[in-house]
Amino acid sequence: MGFVIGTFFGRPLFFSPLAESTSPTEQSPDPASTPKPPEKKGKSTQPQGNPAAKSQAKWDEKSIRSLSLSEVRSQLSQLSTWSPGAAADQVEHWLVQRWAALEPQLACQYAYTAALQGAEESLLLEALSIWATADPASAARWAGNLGSPSLRDSSISTVYSVWAKKDSTAAAKSISSLRPASARGIASAATAPPHATKNFQTAMKWARSLAGPVREKTLDAILGEWTKRDPAGAAAWLIQQPGDVQWALMAKLAGDWVKKDPNAALAWGLGKSTEVAIGSKLAQGPVQRKFFEAALGTLIGSDPQAAANWLASPIGQPFFTSRIGSVAGRWTSMDPMEAVSWSLSLSKKTDRNSAIGAVAGTWARTDPQAAGQWIRSLNDPDLRDTALNAYCGSLSPYDAGAAAQWAVDISAPNARKSTVEAAVTRWLQYDPAAARQFILSTPALDQATKEKLLR
């Protein structure tokens, strides 16, 4: 009897298309009248069903923007008769946008359910943008209660981005009451850039008043926006702050500044800028070193060719040798042959060997066959040995057998022995039979080394 009663009274909630247990429900939708998102599968884009109904319905964007609430609900219900595809998705977007203008919470609830079932996330975010424009506080509360962490984060970011452009002060004040804690961090990061553009120094003061991780994210976001617009001003402000603030934000300033103006950023970091507009110089010490390391590392990571050019300049020359491997390795991950050409062009033998080793080691991880063919084409024995040594070192962790066989080609006896031995030692750990057979047959190892490895 208890089962029958529970089933009878539970059915309406169970079958309600909006009854997602972790979703907010401030309004009570009528299950009979609220459309259900169509299934998201298949490729056909042709509507099916009653031809007469299709001829009466107007599915273009302009017509949909003038529909009443009941007409929107009716047309959304008709979408369930369409085969899923691009045409159905586009009409659904238009209808949900119109619905959001009329009944935002239920439209967003529909879009959220659809996104959980495979619809594009933009269906939800577009509806939320419309709701946030009209009533950002309600939209924020609703978004903060979504059960899906990823959809909740993107929804909070969308709402607060809209809200901050409309009234950044109100958006900022509301963040402290937002739940859960992770949502506050997302909201702060979305609010910070629009809020900061009014007065960066005031915005930074506001951000510093926030608590814990939220403060760090917000400070980063504001400083990033400030650096995009006025890197010198952001730098001048930062060096006037306490040491802990400088330490926390200096790498962020460096990374963003060097992407906009590498020469100015690096010169300021070294304390060698002669431009009056740059403002106060950065004092020598740990913070200065952190700025420079972050700036140069970001430049190498984003544009290794530009980094190579800067390192070859008079101001960058002292750091050239220590950064060759980083530049060559990063360049190889983008364009191996360009990296090879640059490496071979270096005049000093030690620099050239360092670059070639970085190229070979990086290339072995991304395309070992192409890297091996290139190594075989090297005519200089020293360069080939350097490349082989680095190549085998990168190959060994995932294919020690191949690394051991490649290492046999190293011409220098001591380098050949150590590289083969290192690869074979790793090989023995997962395929001892094949490794022992190789040890017994290879001329690259002397008898004493073979006996030691076979024990």
Image (spheres, grey):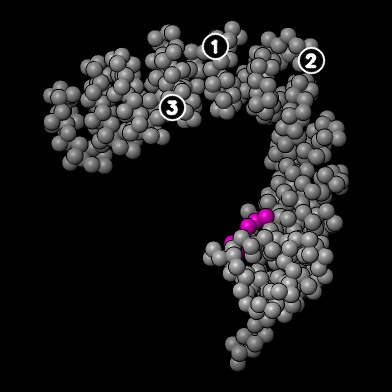
State the SS at label 1: helix
State the SS at label 2: helix
Tag of residue 336: 3
- Magenta-colored span: 116-122
* Residues packed near mark 1 inside 10 Å, few (<14), some (14 to 19) or many (20 plus): some
Distance from Cα at disc 2 to Cα at disc 3: 39 Å
Give how far across and how far down residue 175 sits, in percent: 79, 48
Inspect the image, locate mark 3, and give the three-letter code of the amino acid beneath it. Pro
The residue shown at (73%, 63%) is 60
Q: Quadrant of residue 132?
A: bottom right
Give how far across and how far down residue 414 sits, in percent: 24, 17
Asked whether the viewer can see residue 52, the reply is yes
Left or right? Give the position of 404 relative to 226: left
Q: Quadrant of residue 247?
A: top right
Give how far across and how far down residue 230 sits, in percent: 77, 25
Dots 1, 3 in contact, CB < 8 A: no
Q: Dot 2 corresponds to which residue? A: 277
Q: Which of marks 3 and 2 precedes in the sequence?
A: 2
Inspect the image, locate mark 2, and give the three-letter code of the amino acid beneath it. Ala
* Residues packed near mark 3 inside 10 Å, few (<14), some (14 to 19) or many (20 plus): many
Tag of residue 450: none
> Mark 2, mark 3: which one is toward the viewer?
3
Front-lying residue, 111 or 16: 111
Tag of residue 312: 1
Give how far across and how far down residue 21 sits, in percent: 66, 69
Distance from Cα at disc 2 to Cα at disc 1: 26 Å
